[in-house]
Amino acid sequence: MVWQGAAFSPLQAALALATCGIPVCPYHYPRMDGSGWVASMVCSCDRPQCLQPCAHPLPPDGLAAATTDCDRIRFWWQDHPDANVALVTGIVCDVIDTDPDTGRRAFKALTRRSSGLGPVARTGTGRWLFFTAPSGRPGAVLADGDDATTRPGPLVRWRGLDGSVLAPPSRTLLGNSARWTHPFATELPDPYELAQVLTDAVTATDDQETGRLARLMAPVRRVRSRAALG
């Protein structure tokens, strides 16, 4: 199955994933709240100051309720047609979840290769989701985002067994929708080959920052050299 998913409703997306054997679960979603002086978007859970707006399960059993049963899925989305679509990783596919900069570099690198580019999505927050064949491993952090500076570094997570991600067309609290950048397909790339491409993208980010610092420091070094010679 290959589909771009641009015009899919949440129910259609959930059913398509379930047809591929991927368990799905409805998550809370953004809705308009007009109870105050000014209308605003809130998480459908209606909890004041929700800590995971539009990113936590609707069913009381949480992600454990995820299923491929199409009748159950239709029942859920009949009650909540705007519910976000969470898919469970580690069964049919793993997902490598990256920050915007790393994902952009990796995607460019993969488009230049003859293999390795499988389904890719971008979330409403700008993160990249690279789908791979299942590895049989639990999730892990490949880069933790802490580069010991005030600027956050690369943040790359491997979503494996018992993991989950929000699939297109899920929306953030601001209403930004996830979308497919490269169509979903049943042919999934090797997870370790893809992980290497992502690792190279993280290294490229580090190298670029080092190069940028070197360019900024070059005039200072030249002034110091002239002073020493003078």
Image: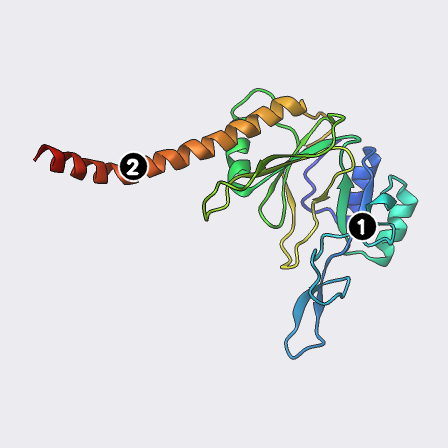
Drawn side of residue 56 relative to residue 125, left or right = right
The three-letter amino acid code for the residue at tag 2 is Arg
Query: What is the tally of numbered marks visible in this picture?
Result: 2
Q: Position of residue 19 (x, y in %)?
A: 83, 35
In the rendered image, which residue does mark 2 sit on? 215
Q: Nearer the viewer, residue 11 or 148?
A: 148
Residue located 50% across and 34% down the image: 105
How dense is the environment of label 2, judged by Cα within 10 Å: few (below 14), some, or many (20 and up)?
few
Residue located 87% across and 41% down the image: 67
Q: Nearer the viewer, residue 47 or 224?
A: 224
Q: Position of residue 59 (x, y in %)?
A: 85, 53
Instruction: Report the coloring of the rendering.
Output: rainbow
- At mark 2, the secondary structure is helix
In the rendered image, which residue does mark 1 sit on? 26
Label 2 vs 1, first from the N-terminus: 1
193 lies above or below 203: above
